[in-house]
């Protein structure tokens, strides 16, 4: 029963935490004359102050706004470059290793095409009918011939498959001139064995076909060793002589891969790896690149690495003898430098933003998003917003800010962690106390799972503060509530209600309209949440649009952890508060 009752309390507290964990600011009377901030959609009137009204651009268009400022590619003397990433030349794989990421999918070429060139060991079906009959399967011998009775040897090696039938027919016609028909069919090729050695994972001799690609044989040998083998220097030997040299970069960059007619006992040798230079960061191809010429132009490496569109700068780390050096400069300057083996280039985005996007929700009669210069304050942005002053409550505007929401979330998570730790690390001296701690742990676990689902909205309260010159951040949302004549009463009341505001009603009158405080409520613990997001205690007057929330009372006879729970919830609500002065 106690556990069930406590969960009921927590349900109300959970709702309270969601509302209270926005921001907390004491509203104070403003006696100064307010200058109109917003454009009036009903009259078209705008602020007549001497400040120039900036012109917004549509979202997704040109964001420069014609404002003067630091070019995006310039380096300010006071700028601290972004930190280097964790990728180093040792952690990057060599360019070309992606060919063998799924080497099991590199299959042999088992098809026989019209362009296949016949060689020793191939099987050919031959049919002769008419004046003579013959139906046999012939093997191409070591001299490259097949032998037909009464005709003799016919050399077929070196002939393309689509030319085989005509070749045999011409040779048979020399002996049988009348009424002889010929049909040939290449049935299969002779398997061969190719040696693969050098900088590969598993050197050895591997079976395959004469038309299989070099990638097939390299994959059978476990792929090129990423630390020893070269992707740029691969030789094919036949009878001790090099018949072909392969550079896989040509295939990776241009799609060029030499077709080789392998023979039995050919040898593939992967030469030692060339010097490598790593390129990482904001690039599409983050790898170690082999360079045949050392040193080499950085421009060639960047072309292979393909920097992202937003990349602007790069770190260059070099080592010359016992001295190491790190430079930081724009990409176009890096591209003019020569680099050598073991150097590292880390590409980064380091643009100086010149504009931000500001969103508007609520009672706005114009565009819902604006592109404004970086550093624009609220009062300047407000002149872009058209509203109907008869509907919009401009005195209750507030901001939603992502950075604030993240800080509120972190505060809630830290408080929950401390709560869980206090429960799980407590000791028990009696069986009764141990049983209570088990129930407390279940209670806290249930509560934590619910609170972790809360996503604070990052509300920044503007009321009662000098907020007019506050600078906006990218992604800020200006919320313009509507005038409201209602008051919401919830929490520990008998019947939660929404009632019409009345100037003669007191706080007790509104609570009475909701049936009064329930037997679990605390009449001395009441919150009033204004439409502008500020939060006050029950001593304040109730205004239009307010939300009255009656909190539960603490029962000392319940679990000992409950008092700590109440304190932590309230502390989270207050610590999540952000007054506007914090952003000045």
Image: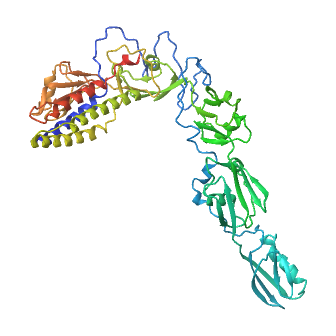
Name the residue at the top extreme: 32
Left or right of 180 in this view: 494: left
Q: Which of 307 and 273 is in front in this view?
A: 273
Q: In which quarter of the image is the N terminus?
A: top left
Question: In the image, residue 375 lies at what x, y percent?
Answer: 49, 19
Q: Answer left or right for 79 relative to 574.
A: right
Q: Report the residue at 10% width, 31% height from top.
A: 556
Give coordinates of residue 19: x percent, y percent.
Answer: 27, 30
User: Does residue 222 sit above or below 351 in this rendering?
Assistant: below
Which of the 4 image quadrants contains residue 349? top right
Q: Nearer the viewer, residue 208 or 568?
A: 208
Q: Residue at x 73, y 37 (%)?
A: 294
Q: Residue at x 90, y 86 (%)?
A: 177
- For residue 256, side relative to residue 78 (left or right): right
* 473 left or right of 570 in image: right
Q: Where in the figure is residue 533, as x and y percent of width and height?
A: 30, 24
Q: Which residue lies furthest to the front in this view?
A: 322
The image shows residue 351, relative to residue 296, as above or below, that is above
Is residue 367 visible to us here? no
Residue 554: percent from the left, percent from the top? 13, 30
């Amino acid at each position: 029963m106690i556990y069930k009752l406590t969960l009921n309390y927590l349900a109300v507290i959970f709702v309270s935490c969601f509302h209270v964990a926005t921001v907390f600011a004491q509203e104070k009377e403003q006696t100064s004359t307010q200058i109109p901030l917003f454009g009036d959609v009903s009259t078209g009137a705008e602020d007549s102050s001497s400040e120039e009204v900036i012109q917004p651009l549509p979202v997704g268009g040109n964001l420069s706004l014609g404002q003067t400022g630091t070019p995006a590619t310039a380096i300010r003397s006071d700028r601290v470059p972004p930190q280097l990433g964790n990728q180093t030349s040792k952690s990057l794989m060599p360019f070309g290793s992606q060919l063998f990421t799924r080497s099991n999918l590199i299959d042999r070429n088992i098809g026989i095409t019209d362009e296949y060139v016949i060689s020793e060991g191939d099987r050919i079906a031959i049919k002769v009918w008419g004046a003579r009959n013959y139906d046999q399967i012939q093997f191409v011998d070591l001299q490259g011939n097949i032998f037909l009775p009464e005709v003799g040897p016919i050399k077929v090696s070196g002939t393309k498959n689509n030319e085989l039938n005509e070749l045999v027919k011409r040779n048979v016609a020399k002996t049988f001139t009348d009424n002889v028909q010929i049909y040939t069919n290449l049935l299969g090729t002779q398997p061969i064995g190719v040696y693969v050695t050098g900088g590969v994972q598993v050197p050895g001799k591997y079976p395959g076909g004469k038309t299989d690609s070099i990638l097939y044989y390299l994959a059978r040998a476990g792929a090129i060793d990423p630390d020893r083998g070269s992707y740029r220097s691969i030789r094919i030997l036949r009878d001790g002589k090099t018949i072909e040299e392969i550079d896989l970069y040509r295939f990776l960059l241009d799609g060029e891969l030499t077709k080789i007619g392998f023979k039995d006992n050919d040898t593939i040798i992967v030469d030692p790896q060339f010097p490598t230079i790593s390129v990482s960061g904001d690039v599409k191809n983050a790898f170690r690149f082999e360079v045949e010429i050392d040193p080499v132009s950085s421009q060639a490496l960047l072309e292979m690495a393909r920097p992202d569109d937003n990349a602007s700068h790069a770190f260059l780390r070099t080592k010359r003898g016992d001295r190491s050096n790190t430079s930081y400069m724009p990409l176009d300057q890096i591209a003019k430098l020569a680099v050598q083996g073991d150097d590292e280039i880390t590409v980064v985005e380091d643009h100086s933003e010149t504009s931000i996007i500001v969103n508007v929700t609520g009672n706005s009669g114009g565009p819902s998003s604006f592109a404004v210069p970086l550093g624009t304050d609220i009062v300047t942005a407000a002149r872009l917003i058209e509203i109907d002053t008869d509907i919009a409550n401009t005195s209750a505007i507030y901001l939603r800010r992502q950075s604030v929401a993240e800080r509120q979330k972190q505060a809630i998570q830290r408080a929950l962690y401390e709560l869980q730790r206090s429960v799980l690390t407590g000791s028990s001296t009696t069986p009764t106390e141990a049983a209570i701690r088990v129930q407390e742990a279940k209670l806290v676990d249930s509560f934590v799972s619910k609170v972790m689902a809360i996503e604070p909205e990052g509300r920044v309260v503007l009321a009662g503060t000098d907020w007019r010159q506050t600078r906006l951040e990218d992604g800020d949302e200006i919320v313009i509530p509507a005038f409201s004549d209602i008051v919401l009463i919830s929490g520990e009341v008998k019947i939660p209600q929404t009632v019409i505001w009345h100037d003669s009603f007191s706080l007790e009158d509104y609570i009475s309209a909701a049936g009064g405080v329930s037997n679990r409520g605390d009449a001395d613990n009441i919150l009033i949440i204004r439409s502008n997001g500020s939060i006050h205690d029950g001593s304040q007057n109730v205004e239009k649009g307010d939300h009255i929330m009656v909190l539960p009372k603490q029962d000392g006879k319940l679990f000992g952890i409950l008092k700590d729970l109440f304190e932590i919830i309230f502390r989270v609500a207050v610590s999540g508060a952000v007054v506007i002065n914090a952003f000045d």
